[in-house]
Amino acid sequence: MQVQGKIEDIATRRPLAELAAARRCEETLLNCYCREVASPAGQLRVGPPAAQNDWPATIAMTLQREPAQVLEVRLPHNHDRLLAVVGGAWLTGNYRYLSPVFHKAENKPWALLDWEALAVLLLREMAQQHQLPPNTELMAQIRNSVAVSTKVLSVPVPATIPADPVEAYIDSEQSLTFGHPFHPTPKSRQGFSDDDLLRYSPELRTRFALAWFAVPRDDIAQQSLLGASCDQLIAAQAPAVCAERVPVPVHPWQAGYLREHPLVRAALASGRMLDLGTQGADFFPTSSIRTLYQPGNPYFYKLSLNIRITNCVRKNAWYELESAMHVNRVLRPLLPDLARRFPGLALMEEPAFLSVDLKDADLEQNRQVIEGFGLILRQSVDTLRAPDCVPLLAGSLFGNHHYGAARMQRLLAAQAAQAGTTVDAMAERWFSAYVAQLLYPVFHLFFAHGIVFEPHLQNVVLGLRQDMPAQLFLRDFEGVKLTPSRHPASSMPGLSERARASLWYDEEQGWNRVAYCLFVNNLCEVIAQLGAGRQVLTTRLWSVVRQHLHDYQHRHGDAASARRINGLLAGHPFPAKTNFSNRFFQRADRASTYVSVANPIPFAGMEAA
């Protein structure tokens, strides 16, 4: 579809999309604030309705219509209160909002609150708590996220998962309509114009050709762990150039950014570098926006994009090019044993990178060029999936609000009918298969090898065989870290000090990241959706997790895993990353702090799946 056609389609759906984007913004802001600020400070109450004569009529009517909890937040520095009706897995904070959000200022009646007023109120409360000026940057990012969400929600999501595995995979990567439910700016893309959004956003079902530059071979920086160099690995997709030059692919948006860079502009003007324009077969942007998929190509192209997407500017930092390669070196010798232990596991290797190094005396500008052109090759799902499996991004099924829920309901209903059982029983069976594919290898890599993966819903691709979990793909070596006790400096010869430092998490940091991504970002979302607010099924699903923790320790465990697993079984809280606070205090992702989330496992009983 052409951009003009997209504009017309979006315009017709815009009013409803604006309402949905506004509602989602309120939900994600409250999710974050309740988890990170109000709950730890004792300023949150979630429970049965108490006698409150002054509550809005909408709240009372909602409570009469269905059993629910009342969520009430106190903002002590502003002497304000917030009120909403919620259902769902309230113990872990995975609420389903059943009413609008109401606000009561001091000496004023309750009033309906819109998303912008809520954002201003929460940011003002944070500023006063910490005696800081208002964070206007975060407010701008929230506005940007709502604007992007409005466009995304204007595009319909197909009701069914395509039957063809390639089409199903593309659809899953491009159907993350709602984004992270515990992030204040889940759809922010600062730097994209409206036209850029239409051209390059995966949720708008886009595809496009790459921009290419012809660069002298002496100006190429590359590494490969394979039998061929990186430029040889991409040669089949590249335009023809003379032997003295190398064709370098760039995201089309990034090409415009690079053409304005002083060193690149000078190289183009002198003829040292040639601009080949946009050409070749189309690539599909995946959920990360900058990592591109092309059916039949053995590699994803993870390209630099100097756009702030949610937390970070998505460029391939020079040290990340090095560190991804080192992670690959560490993992390669482990692959045979991992395949034996976990036959459904597929690690999406990143075995090569390529960039441009102009070797300019201005080290900062030269670094910008290296990072601006950075390309990492990631092994394609096409080369790893079993022939009878359909690969789907886990985030398209879970954490994606009602779109993911509707797809899973249809899938489980069909499975239950085929098996002659109930949908709840099938949900439990399906979830157990999912946990088995996910938890065991992630734990084993951490406890046995000191390798920290981030198995959140956008880093997990699930392979379904006859609609049941049979394969699990883990990706994104940029997020993989190593514990220094298992991977000391002496094991990293030739790695720069900066790259080495970027790879290390101490054991506690590593556990926090694994536990957050696995339990909070992944399993809490899955259980909240499958449980659909029903306590009996939710408890049964957590009992599945409990049983798998026991089974993991019995089959693969050691003293280190026993300590952590026993803590989980005893009710030690889950660590949750503070996305709202990180953005408010403008912290780097690596410097993330964590808050505690209630762990439901001890309340799940000892029943197995």
Image (cartoon, rainbow, N blue to C red):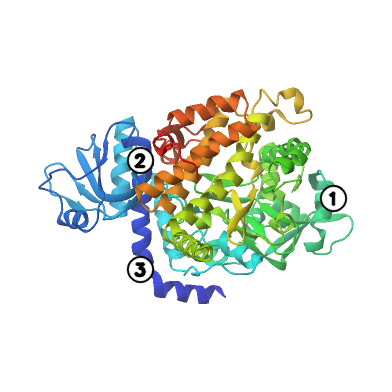
Q: Mark 1 = which residue?
A: 217
Give the mark toward the camera: 2 or 1. 2
- Type of amino acid under label 3: Leu
Location of the N terminus by quadrant is bottom right
Q: Is residue 490 above or below residue 435?
A: above
Q: Position of residue 99 (x, y in %)?
A: 26, 55
Q: Quadrant of residue 500?
A: top right
Q: Is residue 504 above or below residue 137?
A: above
The reply, left or right, for residue 593 in relation to residue 557 is left
Residue 191 seen in render: no
Give the mark toward the camera: 3 or 1. 3
Q: Mark 2 = which residue?
A: 91
Q: Nearer the viewer, residue 72 or 445?
A: 445
Q: Position of residue 339 (x, y in %)?
A: 73, 44
Tell me, yes or no, whether the two marked residues, 2 and 1, touch with CB atoms within 8 Å.
no
State the mark number for residue 447: none
Q: Looking at the image, which residue sits at the far right?
A: 243
- Type of amino acid under label 1: Arg
Q: CA distance from mark 2 to mark 3?
A: 31 Å
- Type of amino acid under label 2: Leu
Q: Secondary structure at mark 3?
A: helix
Q: Position of residue 200 (x, y in %)?
A: 57, 62
